[in-house]
Image (spheres, helix red, strand yellow):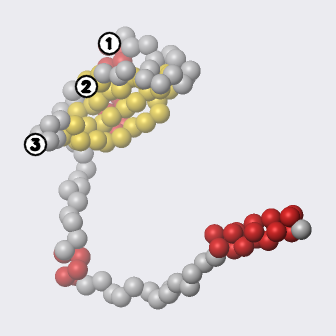
Amino acid sequence: MKSLFCVLAIFLCSCAVFSQTKTDNKPPDKITDKQTSKLPQIKGSKPPIEMPKALKIMGKFIKKQKIDTSNYYLSRVNMIQYGTKNDEKPVWYFRWINVDGRLGDYIEIAVFMDGSVKRMPSM
């Protein structure tokens, strides 16, 4: 009797969890030019230094600074905004992670759009 009650309780709970409500699959109304003009505008343009060039600049920086990357692998490349709130500039951000997976043991390098490079402090 106890096992029948448990099976029934599990069945009812799973039905409640996995049940779906009916959704209206009606396509959206047409979007007008007036509506699109109200959307936030993205300041997007081709960066002065594209990622492949930034990668080469970073490679030269690593050689010049004699940074040992033999126990690291490149795990992330992002374009971020760097600087103070009033003076943010786009920057290519590269993160190398230690092969051992130790937290805080990263190599973080920023390549600025003027070609300058900075090693970011890590833990």
- Distance, label 1 to label 2, CA atoms, is 11 Å
Q: What residue lies at 18% left-to-right and 40% top-to-bottom? A: 89
Mark 1 or mark 3, earlier in chain = 1
Could you say which quadrant of the image residue 55 lies in?
Answer: top left
- Distance, label 2 to label 3, CA atoms, is 21 Å
Mark 1 touching mark 3, by CB under 8 A?
no
Q: What residue lies at 37% left-to-right and 21% top-to-bottom? A: 123
Q: Measured from the top left, where is residue 18 in percent x and y?
A: 65, 71
Q: Is residue 7 left or right of residue 61?
A: right
Mark 2 touching mark 3, by CB under 8 A?
no
Instruction: List the residue tagged with mark 2.
Output: 117
Q: Secondary structure at mark 3?
A: loop
Whether residue 53 is visible to the viewer of this picture, yes or no, is: no
What amino acid is found at the position of numbered circle 1 in the picture? Gln
Q: Measured from the top left, where is residue 104 in percent x and y?
A: 43, 23
- Distance, label 1 to label 3, CA atoms, is 31 Å
Of the pair 87 and 110, the residue shown nearer to us: 87
> Please, which residue is most extreme toward the right here?
1
Q: Is residue 65 left or right of residue 76?
A: left
Could you say which quadrant of the image residue 58 lies in?
Answer: top left
Q: What residue lies at 69% left-to-right and 69% top-to-bottom? A: 13
Q: Measured from the top left, where is residue 82 in percent x and y?
A: 22, 37
For residue 11, above or below residue 44: below
Instruction: List the residue tagged with mark 3.
Output: 86
Residue depth check, mark 1 versus mark 3: number of the one nearer the observer: 3
> Please, which residue is most extreme toward the front here?
1
- Quarter of the image containing the N terminus? bottom right
Instruction: List the residue tagged with mark 1.
Output: 65
> Please, which residue is most extreme toward the top here?
66
What amino acid is found at the position of numbered circle 3 in the picture? Asn
Of the pair 16 and 122, the residue shown nearer to us: 16
